[in-house]
């Protein structure tokens, strides 16, 4: 039996990069996948078709703004109507609007907070009734090493990701007695299409500072998600797993 056989996994922001890697790993482990996307319906349709054909599981994509509580409630209602339940929630959606604080606009601050942090509140609260009814569930929140260490020019992003860690620990304490777990994953430098456009020398400098001497892959993060989503981690909650090649060591 596969690790997530017949489980229903809801992943936000899963049409590319880390989110896509997570959806692929969970589908390969036997899970049925509900995922969200922000804009490209054509891309979402392609992802849905590929996952279904490759892994033989049920997959549905939903366009939804994770920063909107109203849209999130509708999303969860639609997923429950289609799949019957939700077993695992993976809050992956996130954006950056980098700038030094003296140049950062209120809009840049608010946008990052709403998409990165408020979305975690929205999705977790919307899924909670189902988890409580089932007396089971695993919530995985994507934070970042920047949320642990901070980073110049990313005060909004770092604050949102640090907030996710505090939220994760608090929720783990609130719902642990109901057999519901809540953990966070803090990726380090993960090589995706977003990092492919960076200056090679800059990337080389970052990689040299990582003990494992390489950037991570979406699969590296997805494997950690798979562990925390499955019963293999049934006695782990309230924790932040750093997937960073030793960067934070």
Image (cartoon, rainbow, N blue to C red):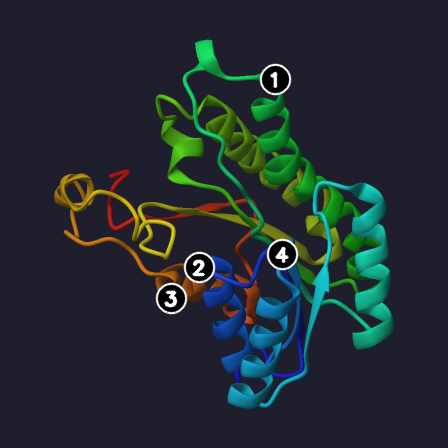
Q: Which mark is residue 219?
A: 3
Q: Which mark is residue 17?
A: 2
| Disc 3/disc 2 C-alpha distance (Å) | 9 Å
Does residue 96 sit above or below 91 in this rendering? Answer: above
Q: Earlier in the sequence, mark 1 or mark 2?
A: 2
Q: Earlier in the sequence, mark 4 or mark 1?
A: 4
Spot occupied by residue 123 in the image (x, y as percentages of width and height): 73, 49
Q: Which mark is residue 12?
A: 4
Which of these two is toward me, 82 or 196? 196
| Disc 1/disc 3 C-alpha distance (Å) | 35 Å
Most extreme residue toward the top is 102
User: In this figure, which residue is indicated by the disc labeled 1?
Assistant: 106
Q: Secondary structure at mark 2?
A: helix
Spot occupied by residue 154 in the image (x, y as percentages of width and height): 42, 26
Q: Earlier in the sequence, mark 1 or mark 3?
A: 1
Residue at the (53%, 85%) spot, across then down: 2
């Amino acid at each position: 039996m596969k690790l997530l056989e017949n489980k229903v996994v809801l992943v936000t922001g899963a049409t590319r990069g880390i989110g896509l890697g997570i959806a692929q790993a969970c589908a390969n482990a036997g899970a049925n996948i509900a995922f969200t996307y922000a804009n490209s319906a054509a891309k979402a349709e392609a992802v849905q078709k590929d996952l279904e054909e490759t892994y033989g599981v049920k997959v549905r994509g939903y366009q939804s703004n994770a920063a909107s509580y109203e849209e999130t409630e509708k999303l969860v209602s639609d997923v429950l109507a289609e799949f019957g339940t939700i077993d695992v929630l993976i809050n992956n959606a996130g954006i950056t609007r980098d700038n030094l604080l003296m140049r950062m606009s209120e809009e840049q601050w608010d946008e990052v907070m709403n998409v990165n942090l408020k979305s975690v509140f929205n999705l977790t609260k919307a899924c909670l009734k189902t988890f409580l009814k089932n007396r089971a569930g695993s919530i995985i929140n994507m934070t970042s090493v920047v949320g642990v260490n901070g980073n110049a020019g990313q005060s909004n992003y770092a604050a949102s990701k640090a907030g996710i860690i505090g939220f994760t620990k608090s929720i783990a304490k609130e719902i642990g007695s109901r057999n519901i777990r809540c953990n966070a994953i803090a990726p380090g430098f993960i090589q995706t299409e977003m990092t492919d456009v960076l200056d090679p020398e800059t990337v080389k400098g970052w990689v040299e500072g990582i003990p494992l001497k390489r950037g991570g892959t979406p699969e590296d993060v997805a494997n950690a998600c798979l562990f925390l989503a499955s019963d293999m981690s049934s006695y782990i909650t309230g924790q932040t797993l750093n997937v960073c090649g030793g960067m934070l060591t």
